[in-house]
Amino acid sequence: MNFVVPDFYPAAAEIFVAVMALVIMLASTFARSIARTLAYYATQFTLIAAAFVTIYTMQGEPVYTFSNLFISDLMGSFLKLMIYFSTAIALLYGRAYLADRKIDKPEYYLLALLMTLGMMVMVTANHMLPMYIGLEMMSLALYTMVAFDRDSARSTEAAMKYFVLGALASGLLLYGMSMIYGATGSLEFSAIAQAVYNQAANQTVLMFGLVFLVAGICFKLGVVPFHMWVPDVYQGAPTAVTLMISTAPKLAAFAMAVRLLIWALFDIAEEWQGMLMLVAVASIVLGNLAAIAQQNIKRMLAYSGISHMGFMLLGLLSGVVDGDRHFALNAYSSAMFYAVSYVIMSLASFGMLILLSRAGFDAENIDDFKGLNKRSPWFALMMLFVMFSMAGIPFFIGFFAKLSVLQAVVAAGYFWLAVVAVLMSVAGAFYYLRVVKVMYFDAPDDEAPIHAPAEVRVMLSANGIAIAALGLAPQMLMSLCAYALLGSL
Amino acid sequence: MEFKTFVFYFLAVIMVFAALRVITARNPVHAALFLVLTFFNAGGIWLLLQAEFLAITLVMVYVGAVMVLFLFVVMMLDINLDRIREGFWSYLPVGALVGILMLIEMVMVLGGSYFGLEAMPAPPAAGEGYSNTRELGRVLYTDYVYPFELASLVLLVAMVAAVALTLRKRKGIKGIPASEQVAVKREGRVELVKMQAEKED
């Protein structure tokens, strides 16, 4: 009965966001007439203020609190900052789009904030329980946001698919967690790592649990063979929500993979690296080849997202070679760099789709980009940046992301893996460049001027320029990733 | 065979049978009722493990609340069984293959050799006056207060989601806004009009 009140200080950002979510809910209930505007600005304020709180409470050494259920470390803080940043930008891009479709209800912003909280909990979890609860909080909010356009049969169908498959994946993940609990006798990551290190855990049961755990993680990342939901959900969801799904949750899923596989199960790294290798190769091959056949650009970006996540896994799987952990830091920081760069590119690509959409019209086919250069040379240039960067053409951020991951793979000695990845990205360059070709060399079908709020234009331009600028100076972001991981490993 | 072992196998066999019937029953109402039976048996097995609080909660929450609600929903929906069964035979080979492989693996791993009494000895019996309920309450509000609070927020998400997705304000319906109804004053309700009495011709 000797219970000490936990230290709330390291969890200040989580507590702040949770309290603000409740405040926003109550405030928009009572101030009905201005609820939409209020909820939007209050959510943006919360995200920005949470970033300051996170920076202010950040500590160099990992700090545990809430009976070791919560960990505050540099990796967590860095990923949390990226999550606020991408959610805030996604909300900014999506606002006018949602308003045009009359689905910009205050609940949307509330759910976005609670989704952010779920991701923060995942990122800072040091125990299976908060990890799972954070995942559910994030997923439930996302399922709802996909279905937010209630009168659209496509959105409802996408939400239903996402929900059913997501529930199945959660079941797999929970089953894996329970098996790992059975093998190691603990749910806390450091205790699991200790038990695995001491070989106190039963290897067969551990492997059995690991398979389910990896399956659950792969579903959340959306990689082959757990990718079936990705194209349908990306296409069916309103573009503003697709933007949301394809950005911050990928960072949360990355954090989940790092915490579960590297924090807890590092001593059986060679086992899960083998599994991830199959998954990564299948994702890169299938993602790139299937994207070529797509006419719908949302589906194309979905398949490209599958292949990007496969690339990200390449970094995670080349940490340990024959028991040698020399490359671990380099490999994991390259994976993190890849995840962060993908989020930046994904924000800009779906942001462009939102820019081209207007009331009653959704830009979602590659043909909608026809002759964009004539309609708006500046945004055609921005889209060119995004597509070149995603294709991995030199001197954009995507190139350095691919390069650092491939360096890690080659350092780990998987030469053939690097060859497959490079060949497939060359195949993938085809569909990215097709968009560029359509923009610059085809005559526009649709001469309507682009009309979007000024803040979207400014932000999107900044986003596109960031892709180019970070490509010219990738070292900064790369060393930030390495530093964040170094402080946590 | 000890009596407890007998009770365990008795409950377990019924549970497995009921669980199978949940997915094979043609009638959704029957399936839901079999799920109730499954929960009852799971509750019984938890009682055998001396987790009486969890067993009673399972019966009260799942059987008493969730499943009753579920039955209502099933009865309200017009489920077309033939549509659901479409494609059953074409998916069966792949599904059955994966299912059987997983079953074999699970039998091999979850069998006695890894989870038997030798591998996992039974925990020492709890002392006199030990209360499961109190212990659960204690850890829930101390060590596990963080996930406990988070779980409440997950429920909030579910609630907001349900309201946001289903609440529709239709125009032109003949409802009465409760707030206006409560706020009504005497003056607004009755208006006395003074007028001359009319004479009958």
Image (cartoon, grey):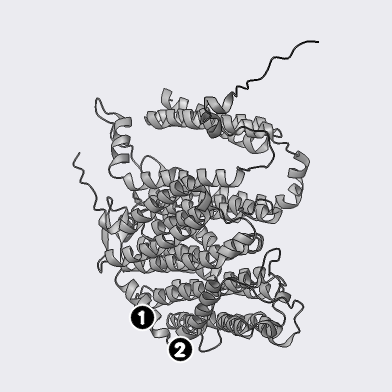
Residue A196 percent location from the top left of the image: 34, 58
Mark 1 crowdedness (10 Å alpha carbons): few <14, some 14-19, many ≥20: some
Q: Position of residue A222 (x, y in %)?
A: 56, 63
The quadrant in which residue A325 appears is bottom left
Residue displayed at 39% across by 67% down: A81
Of residues A296 and A461, the one nearer the viewer is A461
**Residue underneath mark 2:** A472
- For label 1, the residue is A479
Apparent side of residue A450 relative to residue A244 in the rendered image (left or right): right
Q: Secondary structure at mark 2?
A: helix
Q: Give x and y (percent) for residue A425.
A: 59, 81
**Which one is in front, A186 or B145?**
B145
Amino acid type for the residue under numbered disc 2: Leu
Asked whether the viewer can see residue A194, the reply is: no
The answer to whether residue A13 is above or below residue B73 is below
Mark 2 or 1 closer to N-term? 2
* Up/down of B73 relative to A326, above or below: above
Secondary structure of the residue carrying tag 1 is: helix
Where residue B174 appears, as percent x and y from the top left, is 68, 33
Residue A397 visible, this angle: yes
